[in-house]
Structures are given as C-alpha cells and as structure tokens.
Amino acid sequence: MRHAKHKYKLGVDPSHRKSMIRNLAIEVIDHGKIKTTQTRAKAIRGVVEKLVTLAKIDTVANRRLAYKKLNNKDAVSKLFAEIGPKFKERNGGYTRIVKLADRRLGDSSRMGYISFVE
C-alpha cells in the first residue's frame, strides 16, 4: 500500500525529477525568486525550507548535509552566509508561492513564483 507516500512525480523518471528539483532549489537560492509551474514550486518548497533550516546553524556537518543535497559550492556558501542568518528568528515558512493568472502559452499550465519571505 502507498499510504503516506505522496510525491510530486512531475511527469519524468526519478533521476530526472531528482536533478530537476536540485536545479530549481539552486536557482531559488541564487536568485531569491523564480517563475515556474505551480506543481514544480510546490515540489521544491519542502526541499528549500529544509535547507534553510539547516543553514540557520552554521556548522561543518550542516554544510556537508546541504552540499549533499545541492552539489553546488556557490549555492551552499550563499545559503549559509546570507539566507540562513536572515531567517534566524523565524520558525519555518521561509518561502511563498504566488500564483499567476496567466497560463503558459504552449501547454496552458498554471504558473507561479516561488520566493523567499522578506
């Protein structure tokens, strides 16, 4: 039975999904805000929130865990230098998803922004 096994499949095979989620999380960390489909935004929200929670306490172990998830040194250093200290006093809810009224032209998919809360 698949109880409590909900995962966003995103219409791709598992290795592609893992790399897509990793790349989107890196882009959110680098740019602070990206425009993507609502389903992809919901899929990466949990990953980004857990990474920010790790970044609130700057230790070597936490940096290694974040690097294991992201595999990008620049994103990890920005996460621990800028984003983690900014949310030091906040207990979760680091990201927001803003839904857009316009749909994507090619396949009419719902679009939105995922960004960090100020």
Image (cartoon, rainbow, N blue to C red):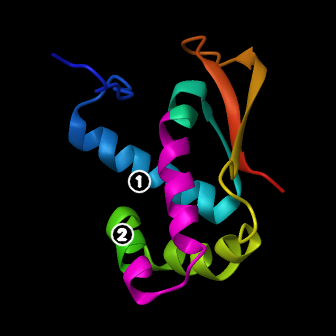
Crowd rating for badge 2 (residues with CA inside 10 Å; few <14, some 14–19, many 20+): some
How far across and how far down the image is residue 103, in percent? 69, 16
| Amino acid at pointer 1 | Arg
Q: Is residue 39 within the magenta segment?
A: no
Frontmost residue, 96 versus 99? 96
| Residue 107's disc number | none
> Which residue is disc 1 drawn over?
22
Residue kind at label 2, given as amino acid type: Asn
Q: Which residues are magenta?
A: 43-63
Extreme-right residue of the structure: 118
Q: Quadrant of residue 107?
A: top right
The vertical placement of 57 against 3, above or below, is below
Query: Which residue corresponds to mark 2?
Result: 71
Residue 28 position, x and y percent, is: 61, 55
As drawn, which residue projects farthest toward the bottom? 60
The reply to whether callout 1 and callout 2 are in contact (CB within 8 Å) is: yes
Q: CA distance from mark 1 to mark 2?
A: 8 Å
Measured as percent of width and height from the top left, residue 47 is found at 47, 50
